[in-house]
Amino acid sequence: MKIGVLGTGMVGSTLGTKLVELGHDVMMGARAKGNEKAAAWVKAAGAGASQGTFEDAARFGEIVFDCTAGSASLEALKLAGPDNLKGKILIDIANPLDFSKGMPPTLTVSNTDSLAEQIQRAFPDTRVVKTLNTMNHRIMVNPSLVPGEHDVFISGNDQAAKTRAAEILKSFGWKSVIDLGDITTARGREQLLPIWVRLMGLYGTPNFNFKIVQ
């Protein structure tokens, strides 16, 4: 499958590498052609990896991953182009974190809205699925880094899109995918980030995750 990855940071690089390893053709998108981080990733990831602009990657991908910083996601997606995202599944991993006042970060949107909802409103013809935003990037593609069973959450308005996204998650090794419901359920997920940051500080490692026990 052809997959576009928007973002050249740790999340985009880790996900892109895993997707290439799984046999997908992956194009990493950045603001400008020739991005140094994207070029380094292509060299490291090898066959199946390519780079371009946000627009190039969105046009290329049958499925697109938003791995940009949450504060820049809407702008990046606008550069990607609504026509290039129309009808496609957009897997949104970004978190609306504001680091302008240092650590710990605050949320740019919460309570009555979420970044995922803002993206869905801005791109009504795109099938937005929120997932993988409640864990470290290494755990996203290798859940076995955390011993035992633990959970990944998924939210979105399009059931078929969520089913397809869940298949990708399972190819990463996820066994427990909890469908929380429509895109509004992304609010609670994004609001987990403040406690996630505190837990990382408490434990001194990002290698942990949430498990729902009934």
Image: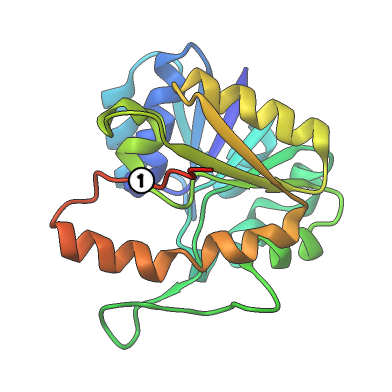
Q: Quadrant of residue 177?
A: top right
Residue depicted at x 39% and y 71%: 194
In front of the other: 194 or 3 = 194
- In the rendered image of this protein, does residue 197 appear above or below residue 60? below
Residue depicted at x 48% and y 26%: 174
Q: Residue furthest left?
A: 204
Residue 43: x and y in percent read 28, 25
Q: Quadrant of residue 74?
A: bottom right
In front of the other: 91 or 213 = 213
Q: Which residue is mark 1?
A: 209
- Identify the amino acid type marked 1: Asn
Looking at the picture, the colour scheme in use is: rainbow
In front of the other: 132 or 83 = 132
Residue depicted at x 27% and y 30%: 147
In front of the other: 206 or 137 = 206
Give the side of residue 8 with respect to residue 92, left or right: left
Residue 32: x and y in percent read 47, 52
Residue 51: x and y in percent read 46, 34
- In the rendered image of this protein, does residue 168 appear above or below residue 130? above
Considering the numbered disc 1 on the image, is that residue within a helix, a strand or a loop?
A: loop
Q: Residue furthest bottom?
A: 101
Q: Quadrant of the C terminus?
A: top right
Q: Quadrant of residue 148?
A: top left
Give the side of residue 179 with respect to residue 49, left or right: right
Give the side of residue 12 with respect to residue 190, left or right: left
Label 1: few (<14), some (14–19) or many (≥20) C-alpha neighbours in 10 Å: some
Q: Tally the marks.
A: 1
Q: Quadrant of the N terminus?
A: top right
